Every structure is written in C-alpha cells, then in structure tokens.
Amino acid sequence: MAATRQAHTVWEGDLFKGTGTVTFDSSGIGEYAVSWPARTEEANGKTSPEELIAAAQSSCYNMAFSNVLAKAGTPPTRLNTKAEVTFVPGEGITRIHLTVQGEVDGMDEAAFVKAAEEGKANCPVSQALAGTTITLSASLV
C-alpha cells in the first residue's frame, strides 16, 4: 500500500531577507521557521531544507539498515546515524555523508560495514537523492 505524506511552506519576501514557515501536515508535529541565513550561515533556531533532508536521510537509512541486519539474522540493538548535508550557494547540495555507529551482537566490523553499504543502497531516500554523492562511515561500538 502506498503512503503519501504532506508538508507545506509559506514564504514571505525575497530570497535573502524573506522568511518562511514549514508545516508538517501529515504528522502534525509542528511548524518550523526557515530563512536563507539559516541555510547558509548559522541556524539561529531555524531549520533549512538541508536539515530536513538530513532528518529524512538518517531516519530512512536506519530503517533500511535495520532491515538488512534483521534479514541476516543479526538485528541491531541500536543504530545511531548522523547525516550531514552540504549545501554550497550557487552549486546546490554537493554531498551527503552518513556516519553510523551500531550495536549488533554476533557481527564483526567487516560484516557490519558491508551491511551498512547494503542499507544505503536499499534506503528509499538514498535512492531519491541518487544525483548527490552519498558517502558512509560505519563502525561498531
């Protein structure tokens, strides 16, 4: 069964001085301010498209990776993934780097790294962002 999720943004003003509000319609988790300075300088309590992509990437990746591990008979105790999305004005999003640390009983480091790469390949958000270089560092804790 397909699932469709919605969010919307209202923007007021020009790119450099304007501000906007992102609303998460499907979940109702809230409204978050966005602005160009929050995107290219300090966040100052506001979010950015890149932070939203990082949240989507890290959560989707953990789901895909946990499924890979479970199918291999070694479900994770815990996965902690950080996604770093790099935005360069005038160029766009130039890279995404994932750093995952995991607690997985019965798995050595080499098998964990191999499974981590498989999780990246199977992550629907990674697939949607295939035009961007996505790198990965994986380790057991």
Image (tube, grey):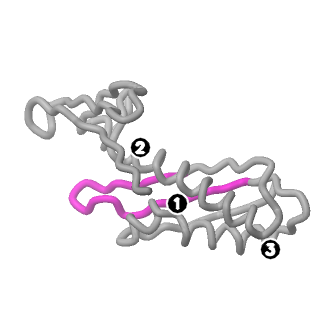
Q: As rendered, which of 44 and 138 lies closer to the eye?
A: 138
Q: Residue furthest left?
A: 13
Query: The residue under label 2 is which amino acid type?
Result: Glu
Tag 3 and tag 2, C-beta contact below 8 Å:
no
Q: Is the residue marked by circle 3 packed among few (<14), some (14-19), or many (20+) residues within 10 Å?
A: few
Mark 1, secondary structure of its residue: strand
The residue shown at (41%, 43%) is: 51
Q: Is the residue marked by circle 2 packed among few (<14), some (14-19), or many (20+) residues within 10 Å?
A: some
Q: Which residue is mark 1?
A: 97
Q: Which residue is mark 3?
A: 110
The residue shown at (67%, 61%) is: 67
Mark 3, secondary structure of its residue: helix
Magenta-tinted stretch: 83-101
Query: The residue under label 3 is which amino acid type?
Result: Ala
Q: Which residue is mark 2?
A: 51
Query: The residue under label 1 is which amino acid type?
Result: His
The quadrant in which residue 35 appears is top left
